[in-house]
Image (spheres, rainbow, N blue to C red):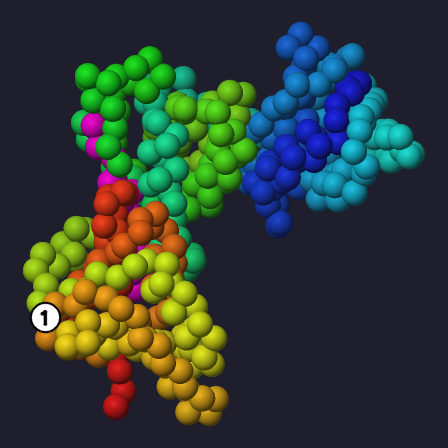
Amino acid sequence: MKLICTQSDLNTHLSLVSRAVPSRPSLPVLANVLLKADETTQRVSLTGFDLSLGVQTSFSAQVEAGGTLTLPAKLLTDIVSRLPDGELTLDAEADGSLATLTCALGRYQVRGMAADQYPELPTLDNGEATHLLVESLVEGLRGSLFATSGDETKQVLTGVHVTAEGDEMEFAATDGHRLAVVQTIKPGAETETAAAPKVATFDVTVPGKALRELERMLQMHPSVEAIAVRFDQGQLIFEWEHQRITSRLLEGQYPNYRQLIPRQFSRQMTVERRLFISALERIAVLADQKNNIVKLSLDGTKQEIVVSVDAPDVGNGREAVAAQVSGEDLDIAFNVRYLLEGLKAFNTTEIQMQFNAATSPSIVTPLGGMKMTYLVMPVQIRS
């Protein structure tokens, strides 16, 4: 194998696939990236796989002799990321056991392993492809991924529940303390295109890790308008422009989250989103000293919301933010991180927050723009 490529191309694509390389691989070869050079297409593909998540990406290069080999992911990434800009030459022996990387300043040799030991990524020949608009997909991920659980013992909650029916898709994520639900409208029959045909019906829970990699890769390909997705027998595949992500789907019944969302409220307030975020971020400096808890006090007379924190050992803080408040006054407390993450996922100028009581879930929604509902459980205030 022999190929010539730029340092930036190799570095960029290595950093993508390396995220699917396990830190404690069950097979030694999985600590490596699989590298394939194709003389016919003049492309190089890289693959990282942990037996659950697989990331495959490819880029154009000058391939003088094709071949396949695997090289240690971390070592190769550490070397390539430190090399200067410019052309690199990668040469490998026929058995792929030793690869030589040459740049303008010198050369490095890295020992690899035979490519035939590397497990193949799953393929779904029978799964019918559904095409999703990238704009809708990114909006759904941005509004839901942050609310997934990091607790591996609640595995089904570490993913995003994605449903599609007719022309609408819904993304939902919860960690037991908050719930984010985003609806995105799909093109209907009257706007159906070859790039984005009508969406098939599906109901799956996709691991958050796979979706974060998808979001990251789509940001690097802003010109992509639609991607193909296939589901079959607990497996999912995303594909577009020589890029591919495979992932196992999460098993288990996802909670019936729709029944958690209250239908009626006795109090509500409308506030400018950026003003509210700024006040919360300043108060959060003190809240960090006291379990991240902030108190919100709705004042209908002054038409304002007071954001405060009282950390007796450190100090206290209080800020008033102008708001349109209706209903009786209320004191209610939240984890400030939960509030901020939800508010930052919105893309509108104003938000509405609705309440019933200090111990009942509250709903935050953007006014105009994206169709998103964010439910946050309050924290009990100790007198």
Where in the figure is residue 376, as x and y percent of width and height? 26, 63
Q: Nearer the viewer, residue 89 or 302?
A: 302
Task: Relative to 86, say whether 63 is above or below.
Answer: above
Q: Which residues are magenta?
A: 167-183
Splitting the image into 4 quarters, where does residue 368 fall? top left
Where in the figure is residue 62, as x and y percent of width and height? 74, 15
Instruction: Please say whether residue 317 is one of the residues in the magenta stretch.
Output: no
For label 1, the SS is loop
Question: Could you tell me if residue 80 is visible in this image?
Answer: yes
Three-letter amino acid code at disc 1? Gly
Left or right: where 150 falls relative to 262? right
Q: Residue at x 77, y 13 (%)?
A: 65
Where in the figure is residue 32, as x and y percent of width and height? 68, 37
Task: Relative to 379, say whether 344 is above or below.
Answer: above
User: Which quarter shows the C terminus?
Assistant: bottom left
Q: Which residue is mark 1?
A: 327
